[in-house]
Image: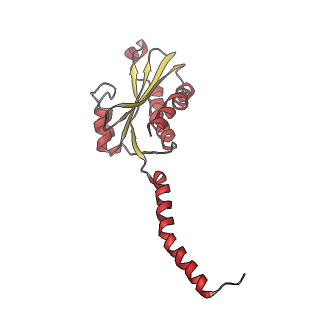
Amino acid sequence: MIEFPLCREARVRRQARLFPVVLVLAALLAMPALAADRAVAVFDFELIDSSLEGSMMGKNPAEQARLETMAPRLREAIDGLEGYEIVDIAPVRDRARSHHLESCGNCGLTFAKEVGADIAVIGSVQKVSNLILNINAYAFDVETRQPIARGSADIRSNSDESWHRGLDYLWENVLSGQLEDAR
């Protein structure tokens, strides 16, 4: 094909006029991908011990150690979910631990707002007996104060494995789907 210099110049000018249009279209298509992640504050889980053992013998160090693993495990799971990012609760951790977040009149939402979170996640492990325990987790939209995810998992056995399996079950079968729907 023979190409004349004047034709090539006209084609280059047409392409140059289309280039900004292509850039704008590409930017518009990429907008959802550039949308900001929702910031999530996952507070430390609390132990609600309604068993006779707890009232007679006090805090169980093994349960306290297990309790310390719950929030980090849930943070890691949520952080792996597209559209969410975990925020550090360190600035409010001590105050949050001094309250019972499930019954303090939404103080967890106030603490979450202080650290710049869009979502507050609170959780607990209720010990009915050494054999029967229940893991609960709730996620609330900080602005609307409405629940966006919540779930519960009953576990049998008071061991590291049962607590982790219970939380994993709760995440995989309940919470992850609700959080995906809330994006």
Using the image, determine if residue 48 lies above or below residue 88: above
Residue shown at the point (53%, 26%) measured from the top left: 166
Q: Position of residue 9 (x, y in %)?
A: 57, 83
Q: Horizontally, is 10 left or right of 32 in the view?
A: right
Name the foreground residue: 77 vs 7: 7
Using the image, determine if residue 32 lies above or below residue 24: above
Residue shown at the point (51%, 75%) measured from the top left: 16
Q: Which image quarter holds the C terminus?
A: top left
Q: Position of residue 101 (x, y in %)?
A: 33, 29
Q: Position of residue 64 (x, y in %)?
A: 44, 29
Q: Residue furthest bottom?
A: 5
Q: Which image quarter holds the N terminus?
A: bottom right
Q: Quadrant of residue 40?
A: top left
Q: Position of residue 82 (x, y in %)?
A: 50, 45
Residue shown at the point (60%, 82%) measured from the top left: 8
Name the foreground residue: 64 vs 48: 48
Q: Residue furthest top?
A: 52
Q: Quadrant of residue 164?
A: top right
